[in-house]
Amino acid sequence: MSIYHLAHVADWTAAVNDGRYTVSTRGADLAQVGFIHASHAHQVSTVAEFLYADDPEELCVLEVDTEAAIAAGVELIEEDGGEGEFFPHIYGAIDPNWVTRVWPARFADGRFIWG
């Protein structure tokens, strides 16, 4: 199974070089939040439009292999985002080897497009 994380391309590029990705969400990292925010495929566009619509940086969507993360001992927990909708949270850094695909992403006419 896969889950998805919105990322700035620059942060992802740095993570590939460093061997770990630690950005939780826009403007916050794993050390500050305690987990990395993720989404199911059907949630990605809504989250992007809410959090990143005014962000000028280039974005991408990381497709994370949940089995690889769990096998490495990272805890993945489905938690309520505050409105009764559950989102996956990754309790640890993302190893770039767990990312099976990096989807290009952009905004067009206010809508988030990825894939």
Image (cartoon, rainbow, N blue to C red):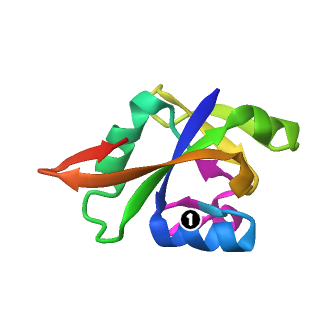
Q: Front-most of 63 and 53?
A: 63
Give the percent coordinates (x, y) of residue 95: 74, 55
- Residue 94 can be seen in this image: no
Quadrant containing the C terminus is top left
Residue occupied by mark 1: 12
Tell me the residue at 55%/45% (across/down).
Answer: 101
- Quarter assignment of residue 80: top right
Tell me the residue at 69%/45% (across/down).
Answer: 90
SS category of the residue bearing label 1: helix
- Quarter assignment of residue 14: bottom right
Tell me the residue at 31%/66% (across/down).
Answer: 55
The single residue placed furthest to the left in the displayed view is: 109
- State the count of labels: 1
Quadrant containing the N terminus is top right
Disc 1 marks a residue whose amino acid type is Trp
- Residue 48 can be seen in this image: yes
Could you classify mark 1 by the number of other residues whose Cα lies within 10 Å: few (under 14), some (14-19), or many (20 or more)? many
107 vs 27, left or right, is: left
Say above or below: 43 vs 33.
Answer: above
Tell me the residue at 53%/41% (across/down).
Answer: 4
Say above or below: 1 vs 106.
Answer: above
Q: Front-most of 2 and 55?
A: 2
Q: Front-most of 25 and 71?
A: 71
Residue 29 belongs to the span the image colors magenta:
yes
Say above or below: 51 vs 101.
Answer: below
User: Which segment did they paint magenta?
Assistant: 24-37
30 vs 55, left or right, is: right
Residue 13 belongs to the span the image colors magenta:
no
Give the percent coordinates (x, y) of residue 52: 33, 58
72 vs 64, left or right, is: right
78 vs 61, left or right, is: right
